[in-house]
């Protein structure tokens, strides 16, 4: 179970994230209800923008009936669809009128046209494009959708401003000939991922997920370790061991050795799953970093930190229930705080400070340096030292607790 | 019997953290090589605490203990090499087989390879467990577990064996096998320190007994002599009840 369950966890979480990722990038799996009351250029531009993005499937009919504001709203209310967009009647004409007035006012500033007349005209009230969201929709999805609408709107408006300028100038100055290539998009966005590796690796779900869930599984060694320690204590085996010619520290180190081997085997199983198993599910293959030694060292110090933490809880906890509850919940908290689930850069400033105190954060930072940035042994030294110190601290607390507080020794 | 004690206890006291009364209250005792010495007492009298200190499980609050000429405060690791401990609870791993348990504990005493295998085979045969050696200890009967529990304390041929209630809760056959074996190894010179609630068993087995109550030794001597000192009592159990009272203990 220690090996199978983490592998299952990696596959499922990667599939889920890949699905989520794809829905915003490749496959049009998110259905958007589209109510077109405008029936003009703007609504057509927004609709075609959605289709071209390949992120959304636009639906304008339900049961062969054209959608209306209320049918779309009810469909979202019932939870049948995540989102509905209503472009109001006259949206395009309002935009055009306002653009035309804006251009005329600008030209009037140069004395072109009829300044006296245009300066007295006021802009039409703006129109609202309504978007109904299902309450379960996440903020990131909302932002992506609204950005997509805004992008299409601004493109359309910019295009319309140019056209109107040309038309107005041509009207006022008959000798003016509008150029055929007056406008060209200036900015192109090119993604690059600076890393230590020579061949650039584009981050993907496997590169993100495998290290994160591997760390999570490694720290869950706390559960079997604490259960074994308490069982030993309650069953009397520890009593016998303590009467044997070995020190308590030797016994502890014996346990550390055994569980380190288990942790390292677990890590190897999860990395192999990333390389061999994930591609079978259509997921990207995990690419190990440039430096296998760095990966080994990082895995070793993370394992040591996890085992040290387990030893400490196993010694201090009085019952199986105490150890299981505290052990599992504390690992989940450390994982959440440490940025395994939500990236640290998305956290509030004070949470970012707290995140830096989580050993799981040191672990994920080290692993990301190897897996995503192609870092070597030198790059991971700060995280490795922190994890090593965490291990030494937890083992020291364990030994001191045994010496001064444990009922077995007092 | 040599007059030089193999175990010397001088004014041994143990007060547990937070306790008002000492669990062991300044007891002094000498146990000689080759003795079967019984520590008898009602529940909570201080027997297990005394044995735990002698085995190095935890330190005494005050007092001195010397075992086989070694000071327990400075030479506990060496002392642990010459003593064997059979705890009251079944101190075995239930998911491991009898043989695996014995191999693990043998390894902890520094025994390895064929020497350990031969010893384990010998003891498993001696205690009638050879057919069950591969079965998980968790599936053993109470008597079988007690026998494996005993073997685990004998594997390294200790000079002194501490047995805490070794026959509690088992069938008559297992009890007889265990007691006969203890007498057999005692004849070979092994010193046995033994606690029990079974007065009849102690009377038969022990060369001397100490009756402890509320952390104090209230009687010490040969069981027959202790009975003889109280003419109105016919056996050790009567003497024990007389000395410790009829009040039930927690």
Image (cartoon, coloured by chain):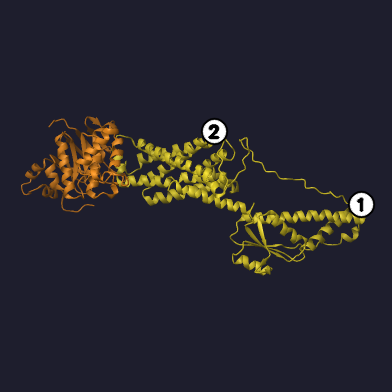
Q: Colour of chain B?
A: orange
The image quarter in which residue A152 lies: bottom right
Q: Secondary structure at mark 1?
A: loop
Relative to A35, A105 lies left or right? right
Is residue B162 shown above or below A88? above
Tags 2 and 1 in contact by the CB under 8 Å rule?
no
Q: Nearer the viewer, residue B112 or A382?
A: B112
Relative to A249, A62 lies left or right? right
Q: Position of residue B30 (x, y in %)?
A: 17, 35
- How packed is label 1: few (under 14 Cα within 10 Å), some, or many (20 or more)? few
Q: Chain of mark 1?
A: A
Q: Is residue B111 visible?
A: no
Which chain is yellow in the picture? Answer: A
Distance from the alpha carbon under mark 2 to that under mark 1: 66 Å
What residue is disc 1 on?
A176
What residue is disc 2 on?
A377
Q: Position of residue A398 (x, y in %)?
A: 39, 40
Q: Chain of mark 2?
A: A
- How packed is label 2: few (under 14 Cα within 10 Å), some, or many (20 or more)? some
Q: Which mark is residue A355?
A: none
The image quarter in which residue B190 lies: top left
Residue at the spot 87% in from the left edge and 49% down from the top edge? A179
């Amino acid at each position: 179970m220690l090996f199978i369950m983490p592998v299952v966890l990696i596959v499922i979480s990667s599939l889920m994230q890949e699905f989520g990722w794809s829905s915003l990038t490749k496959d049009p799996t998110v259905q958007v209800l589209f109510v077109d009351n405008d029936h003009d250029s703007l609504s057509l531009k927004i609709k075609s923008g959605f289709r071209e993005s390949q992120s959304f499937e636009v639906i304008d009919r339900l049961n062969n009936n054209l959608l209306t504001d209320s049918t779309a709203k009810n469909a979202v209310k019932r939870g049948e669809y995540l989102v509905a967009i209503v472009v109001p009647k006259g949206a395009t004409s309002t935009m055009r009128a306002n653009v035309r007035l804006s251009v005329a006012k600008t030209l009037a500033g140069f004395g072109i046209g009829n300044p006296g007349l245009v300066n007295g005209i006021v802009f039409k009230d703006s129109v609202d494009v309504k978007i109904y969201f299902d309450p379960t929709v996440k903020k990131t999805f909302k932002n992506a959708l609204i950005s997509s609408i805004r992008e299409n709107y601004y493109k359309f408006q910019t295009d319309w401003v140019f056209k109107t300028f040309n038309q107005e100038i041509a009207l006022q100055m008959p000798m003016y000939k509008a150029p055929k290539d007056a406008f060209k998009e200036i900015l192109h966005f090119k993604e690059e991922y600076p890393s230590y590796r020579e061949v650039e690796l584009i981050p993907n779900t496997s590169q993100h997920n495998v290290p994160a869930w591997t760390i999570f599984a490694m720290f869950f060694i706390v559960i079997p370790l604490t259960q074994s320690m308490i069982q030993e204590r309650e069953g009397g085996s520890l009593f016998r061991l303590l009467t044997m010619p070995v020190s308590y520290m030797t016994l502890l180190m014996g346990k550390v050795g055994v569980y380190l081997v288990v942790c390292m085997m677990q890590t190897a199983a999860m990395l192999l799953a990333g390389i061999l198993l994930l591609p079978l599910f259509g997921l990207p293959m995990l690419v190990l970093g440039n430096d296998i030694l760095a990966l080994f060292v990082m895995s070793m110090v993370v394992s040591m930190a996890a085992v040290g933490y387990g030893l400490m809880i196993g010694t201090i906890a009085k019952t199986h229930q105490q150890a299981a509850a505290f052990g599992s919940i504390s690992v989940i908290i450390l994982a959440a705080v440490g940025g395994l689930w939500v990236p640290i850069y998305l956290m509030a400033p004070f949470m970012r400070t707290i995140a830096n105190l989580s050993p799981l954060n040191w672990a994920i930072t080290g692993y990301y340096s190897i897996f995503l940035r192609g870092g070597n042994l030198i790059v991971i030294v700060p995280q490795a030292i922190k994890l090593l110190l965490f291990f030494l601290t937890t083992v020291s607390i364990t030994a001191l607790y045994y010496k001064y507080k444990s009922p077995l020794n007092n | 019997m040599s007059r030089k004690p193999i175990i010397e206890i001088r004014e041994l006291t143990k007060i547990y953290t937070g306790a008002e009364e000492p669990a062991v209250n300044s007891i002094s005792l000498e146990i000689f090589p080759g003795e079967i010495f019984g520590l008898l007492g009602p529940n909570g009298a201080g027997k297990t605490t005394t044995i735990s200190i002698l085995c190095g499980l935890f330190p005494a609050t005050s007092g001195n203990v010397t075992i086989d000429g070694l000071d327990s405060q400075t030479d506990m690791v060496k002392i642990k090499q010459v003593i064997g401990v059979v705890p009251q609870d079944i101190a075995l791993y239930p998911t491991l087989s009898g043989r695996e348990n014995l191999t693990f504990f043998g390894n902890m005493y520094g025994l390895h390879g064929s020497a350990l295998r031969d010893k384990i085979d010998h003891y498993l045969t001696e205690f009638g467990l050879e057919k069950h050696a591969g079965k998980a200890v968790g599936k053993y009967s109470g008597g079988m577990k007690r026998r494996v529990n005993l073997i685990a304390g004998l594997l390294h041929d200790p000079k002194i064996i501490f047995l805490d209630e070794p026959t509690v809760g088992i069938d008559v056959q297992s009890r007889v096998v265990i007691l006969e074996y203890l007498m057999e190894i005692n004849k070979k010179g092994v010193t046995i320190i033994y606690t029990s609630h079974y007065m009849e068993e102690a009377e038969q087995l022990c060369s001397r007994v100490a009756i402890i109550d509320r952390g104090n030794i209230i009687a010490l001597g040969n069981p027959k002599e202790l009975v003889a000192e109280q003419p109105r009592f016919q056996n050790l159990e009567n003497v024990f009840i007389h000395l410790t009272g009829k009040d039930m203990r927690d």
